[in-house]
Image (spheres, grey):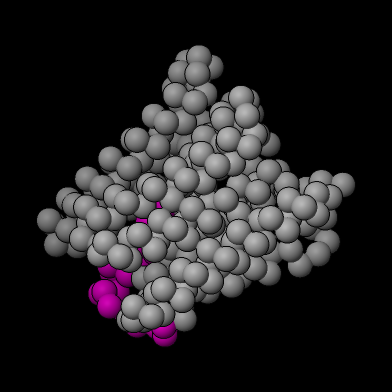
Amino acid sequence: MKRLYEKNELMFSLAWIIAYVVLFSVADSVSIALGTAKIVTVPLCAIMTAVLTSWIVKNGLRGKYGLCKIEGAYRKYFYFLPLIVIASTNLWGGVFLRMSVVETILYIISMICVGFIEEIIFRGFLFQALCKENKKRAFIVSSITFGIGHIVNLLNGAEVVSTFLQICYATAIGFLFTVIFYQSKSLVPCIITHSLVNSLSAVAGESTKTLAIVTAIVLTVLSVAYAVWLLRKGDMNE
């Protein structure tokens, strides 16, 4: 793993993304076939999270990949308030326990790990690798890649319209998270928000088409507007 990283960071990040998408899709399918959602996915999540964390720490890369304290003015002001809005969106339609208690617990555990893994491989590995060539391109490519990655949900039975909406707002959120990471040098707030969004979907109430569209619009507009504001303010590391 270290040899590939030292040879080509971009290929290293893409290898992780491909492995993540394929392995998690297979694990989810096998879990469903066994009759308990996420029963196979959770161990995979735990292993991948442990491998990523230990590798980053062992190679002294915590600072590079944002597993560190927040820098700059973020520590002094309420710059993370929009993240609370983003994290709460799965509760806008109410709360409903649609899975068994065991499956709900497994789902929440897997989603917490997914929040960590996706932030590390998309915002950490991919963005940092692309930054070496062109920062603007890095922002665009890492955000779009993260958004389009959600198309895999179609393989798990998701509807086309809901998946399209998810791709749109996931791209916008990905852009915001990348800006926050770039400005604050920390992925911690992004990991926490991402994990909350994912986890709360386990108890999300039934969403109407209208609510789904409104939610997607709010998430997209809020994320892009907030990211642009942070970039224009430009004093986060001072």
Q: Check residue 99 for magenta coloring.
A: yes
Range drawn in magenta? 93-114
- Return the x and y of residue 25 as percentages of the image width and height: 26, 47
Which residue shows up at 60% across the image and 47% down it?
178
- Return the x and y of residue 221 as percentages of the image width and height: 57, 66
Q: Nearer the viewer, residue 2 or 131?
A: 131
Q: Is residue 231 left or right of residue 72?
A: left
Q: Nearer the viewer, residue 38 or 198?
A: 198
Q: In this picture, is 56 found above or below 222? A: above
- Return the x and y of residue 225 as percentages of the image width and height: 65, 62
Q: Nearer the viewer, residue 193 or 211?
A: 211
Q: Which of the 4 quarters of the picture holds residue 134?
A: top right
Q: Is residue 177 left or right of residue 146?
A: right
Q: Residue furthest bottom?
A: 94
Q: In this picture, is 18 found above or below 151? A: above
- Return the x and y of residue 212 as percentages of the image width and height: 39, 74
Residue 177 in view in this figure: yes
Which residue shows up at 47% across the image and 81% down it?
92
Residue 128 in view in this figure: no
**How many marks on residues?**
0
Q: Check residue 122 for magenta coloring.
A: no
Question: Where's the N terminus, which quadrant?
Answer: top left
Q: Is residue 161 left or right of residue 62?
A: left
Which residue shows up at 35% across the image and 40% down it?
20
Which residue shows up at 55% across the image and 42% down it?
140
Q: In this picture, is 153 found above or below 216? A: above
**Predominant SS along the magenta part:** helix
